[in-house]
Amino acid sequence: MKRRVRIFFLLLTTTAFPTLAQSPGSISGFVRDAQTGETLLFANVYLSATSYGAATNTYGFYVIAGIPAGEYDLTVSYLGFETHTQQVTIEENRNLRIELELTPFSVDFGAVTVVADRLEAEDARQISLAKLPAARIANLPSILEPDVFRSLQLLPGIKAASDYSSGLYIRGGTPDQTLILLDATTVYNPSHFFGFFSTFNADALKDVRVYKGGYPAEYGGRIGSVVDLYNKDGNRRKTSGRLSLGILASRVLLEGPYSKGSWMIAFRRTTLEPLLSALQNQDIQGIPNQFYFYDLNAKINLDLSPDDKISIAAYAGRDFLDIEVIEDTDILLEYGNRTLSARWTHILSETAFSGITLTSSRYFSDPRFSIAGTKVTRDNTVDDFSIKADLELLFNRNHSLKLGTWTGLFKLRLLDRFDNLDSFSERINTGYGSAYAQHTFLAGSGMTLTSGLRASYFGNGQYFRIEPRFSADYQLRETVRLQISAGRYHQFLTLISNEAFSGFDVWLTTADGVPPSYGDQLVGGVKWSLPRGYKLDIEGYYRTMTALFELDPFVGDPAGLEYEEFFHFGSGWASGLEVFLERSTGRLNGFLGYTFSVTRRQFPTLNDNRPYPPKYDRTHDVKLVTNFELGRNWRTTAAWSYATGQAYTEPASRYRLNDFPFGSEPINAIVSPFNRARLPAYHRLDVGFDKRGRFFGFADYTFRLQVLNAYARNNTWFYFFEFEDDDTVDRTTVPQIPVPIPNLSLTLDF
Amino acid sequence: MKYVLLRALIAFLALVVSACDTTSSSIHEDEVVVESYLVAGEDISTVRLTLTSEIGSRYDASQLGIRNATIFVRLLSETGDSEFEIEYVHDENRPGIYIPADPHTILAERTYALEARVPGHGIVTAQTIVPGTFSVQCVNATSVQYQGPVQFEQTVTVSAYPGRQSVFVFSLEALEPSIATLTPFYLDVIYEISSGEEYDASSLDVEELDDFLQNSSPPINEGNYIVNPDGTLTIGLPWFAIVFYGESRVHTSAIDDALFDFLRYQQVQQGGTTLSPGEIPNVLDHIEGGRGVFGSFSRISTVVNVLR
C-alpha cells in the first residue's frame, strides 16, 4: 500500500504544479436549452479549428481558458440539439462571459442530419461513464411505468437480478456498492413496489450519469459505482406541463418561470384503487385492502445575480400496502424516502467556480404484522444530514483543480419488536467526512491526466482511509481515444436486503471489529467515433472487493449478539469486457451492448469458503435497443436482451433426520455444491409504438402502446425444491415475467 | 456502415452461442448420516445411521439404514479423556437404529463423543456439550383465553452453555388435536377456510393436521427476554404458536451448538434470507466424516389450556 501511495504522489507532483501564468484570455458562461432555459450538463463548447474546448459542469457552466487573443468561431453542441456557432473576439487578459443557448431538434427526424463527430461533449465520454438522457428513458419500453434503473440495466456492465428487481448490479457489485445521488443527496432505498420499480420519476429528471467504475476522486463512499441524477430546474421561458395517464400510475409535471428564476414540480401516484375495489367486490382472496405509492419532486431556482444561484430541491416518496393474506392476519408495509437539498453556486471569477450544498436524506421502513394476535413490528429510519463544498479552479489552459469536502451526520434507528417485547434494537449516530483534490492536466499531444486523492473518515469505529485515483485519456487520432483509470475505494455502509423484496431494507455501518470494505479498480478502454454518427466503446475492467461485511444469513435471531456477530466477512473480484456500439442520431438510432463478465465471491460460511459465482453473475450479456422514426408522428422502439444463465444451486443429495425432536414430522436437508449450476439462458423482447400529434389544439399528445416480453419467453427466475409427502423432491420452476405485458399510456404536453 | 448494427449483432450471437456457460450437474455421493439427541437428565438415546439419498430418488429410511456399524458414545472428562463408554447394538427390527447396550442418564454441562465405524465409509465422529438443566419457577396461568388480555407466561431459570447465551426452541404439543379445535389462523392455513365459513369437518383430510401436532419455533436467543432481578427469565407464549384450542404441552428446550447450527442453516435452505432465491447453502454439520446431528438439549415442560 505504501508503495502505491508513493506512486500516486509521484503522479500528482508531476501533474499538479501548473504554471500560474496569466491566461491570455478566456470565455465562460452557462449553456441552456433555448426553449426551456434548462442548463445543459456536459455540453461540448469549443473553438472551431483549434484544440481549445471544454464541457459544461454539473451546473451547466463552462470555462475555456488560455486562449490567445484573436477571432474565433465558438461552437457548442449537445446531443439532441442543433449545433450553434458564433464568432467571438478574445482579448488578452480578459474574460468573455457568453451565455449560450441551443435549440432542440424538431421531431421531424427526417430532417436531421448526422452532425460532426464532436457532437457529444468529450467529458460525457469519460471512461466508465454512461449517460442516459431522460428523454430516452421515457421512450424505452417499460413495465407499466418508465423506469430509470430498468433503462440503465440495458447498458453493458449493468445487470438486473431478475425481471422483478430494479436493483443495479454493476460490474459484479451488489446494489449497495453503488452510490445513488439525486441532486447531490444520497438516496438510500431507491425503489417503489418493494423493488419492482426504481423510485425516480423520469419526467422530473434532466440528466442521469452512471460511473460504472474507476470513478474520480470527487465521488466516494462506495466501492463500486455512482449513479448521479439531476432533477429538472424548470422551464425558464414559459409555464408548461405534462400529464401522463398510465395503467399503473399517472403523472403530472408543471414547470415555469418566475421573476427570479424557475420552478418545477412533478407528482406521480398509482391509480390502482378502482381495480383493487373491483377485485375485492368479486371476493378474490389476497387482494390488498390498500396499495399505493407516490413520489413528489420539486425544485425552485433563485438567481441572486448572474454569478450567484440558489436551488432548493425536494423529493418525497412512499409505498404503502395493507393486505390480509390469511385469516386473522394483517400486514401493513410502509417505506419511503425524503430528500431535501439546498445548493448555492457562486462564480468566484472567470476561472473559479464554487458550490455549497446542504443535504438531508431520510429513509424509513415501518412494517407491521399481526399474525393470529401476535404483533411483529419494525421501526427503521436512516437520517443523513450533510454539507458539501466544491471548488473548481482553472489555472490555465492545461491545469484545472477540483477541491471539495463532504461532511455529515449519519443516524440509524432500528427497533424490532416481537409480541410486544423489544427483540432487537440498534442506534447509530455517527459523523463522517471526506475531502478530495482532483487535478486535471492537459499534457499535450492529446494526453489528459487526472489524478486525485480522497481522504475519508467514518466515526463509527473511527476509520480513516486514503483513496488515490488516477485516469489518463489519450487522443490517439481525432476519432480514437484510449483511456485508463485506476483507484482505491472504501465503503463504510452495508445493506441488508433481498433480491426479491426491498421493502425491509436495513443499512448498517462499520464499527469496532467491523472495518470498512475496500476495493481496487483498474479499467482500460478505447472510444472510437465512427462515421455516420456511430460510436464504439470497448472497456475492460478488473476490480477487487475486500473486507466485505454483510449480514450473516445464518444469524437468524440477532438478539443478545455483539454487533460484529451480525456479519460475515468476505471478499470477491470481478472482471469483464464491455462493448457498446451506439448511434444517437438519424431515423434509426439506438445501441448494441455486449458484456463478458466473471464475478466471484468468497465467504467462510458459504461453499466451504471457496470462491463461488453469485446468482447475479452472467457470463455473456447482449442488449439491443433501437428507435425507428416511422414518420413525422410515428415511432417504434424495441429492446432485446439475451444473457447466459445465472448461477444457482442444483441439489445433489438429501438426508433426513427421522427422529427430529422439534416438530411433528422428520426434517430434511439438502447437500449440494453451491451455485455450481446455471439456469437456462435468458432472453426477452420488448416493443413499443408511439403516436404523436395535437390534442384538441391545446396540447401535444403521445399515445404509447408497449408490450413487454413480446414473444412470451418463459424465463426462469429460480428453482424451488420441495420435499413431497411421497418422499420425493419436486423441482418447481419459478418464472420471470412469463407472459406479454401490455402497457398503454397517454401523455399530454402543454 | 449501413449494416453495422446487423453485422455486429450476428457476430455477438455467434460468440454467445459458441461460448455459453456449461451447466454442471450435481454428483451424488453416499455419505453417512448420524442422528442422535441426548437429553439432559434423561436416558441415553438411540443412534440412527443412514446414508444420504440421491436427490432424484425416493427416500426410504429402511433401505438407507446402515446395519453393520460399530458405535460407541463416550463421556469425556474436562481434559478430553474418556471417563466411560457405552457400546451400541443394532436393532435388527429397525434398520439403521442402534440401541445403547447399557443404561445411562445424560449429564448436563458435560461433553459426549460419538464414534461410529462404518465399513466402506470410514470413521464418523462427533461431540456435543449438553446444555445445563433449568426449571420452571412459576407460570402466570394454567388456562388462558385465546387472544384474551392475559398471555401464558412461564418464569424459568437460565440454562448454562459455554461461550454463548442460551438458545431456546419452543414446541407446542397439542393434547387435543382435531379439525374442530383449530384456531382460525391455522384453519385457513391448513384448509383455506375463513372464519364464519361453513364447512364439513368429515370431508376434510385429517392427516393434514400431522404437520401441526407439535409446532416448533426457530431457535430464539435468550437475549430476547428480560432478565428478572433474581436472574430468571419470563417467557411468553405468542398467540400465533397456538394451533389448537384445548390443552397443549409447552416444551422449552435449550439446545447445543449442533442443533442450533443445524436448525439455523436448514432454515436458510428454505429461502427468505439475504441470499438470492435459488442459492442453497449446505447445512453446517458438527460431524466429522459424515453428516447429520449428534446433538443435545435440556428441556422443561408445562401444560396450558387455551380456551376459545
Image (cartoon, rainbow, N blue to C red):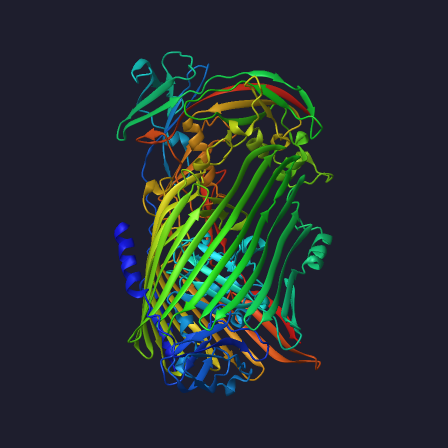
Residue A98 vertical placement versus A261 (above, below): below
- Give x and y (percent) for residue A743: 59, 67
Q: Between residues B170 and A508, which one lies in front from this camera angle?
A: A508
- Give x and y (percent) for residue A478: 33, 80
Which quarter of the picture shows residue B5? bottom left
Horizontal arrangement in the rendering, residue A453 relative to residue A135 (left or right): left
- Give x and y (percent) for residue A444: 30, 75
- The residue shown at (33%, 51%) is B24
Q: Between residues A336 and B168, which one lies in front from this camera angle?
A: A336
Q: Is residue A232 visible?
A: yes
Which quarter of the picture shows residue A32? bottom right
Q: Between residues A637 and A199, which one lies in front from this camera angle?
A: A199
Residue A334 vertical placement versus A132 (above, below): above
Horizontal arrangement in the rendering, residue A613 relative to residue A730 (left or right): left
Total marks drawn?
Answer: 0
Q: Is residue A663 visible?
A: no
- Give x and y (percent) for residue A200: 56, 61
Which quarter shows the C terminus of chain A? Answer: bottom right
Residue A425 vertical placement versus A646 (above, below): above
Q: Between residues A205 and A352, which one lies in front from this camera angle?
A: A352
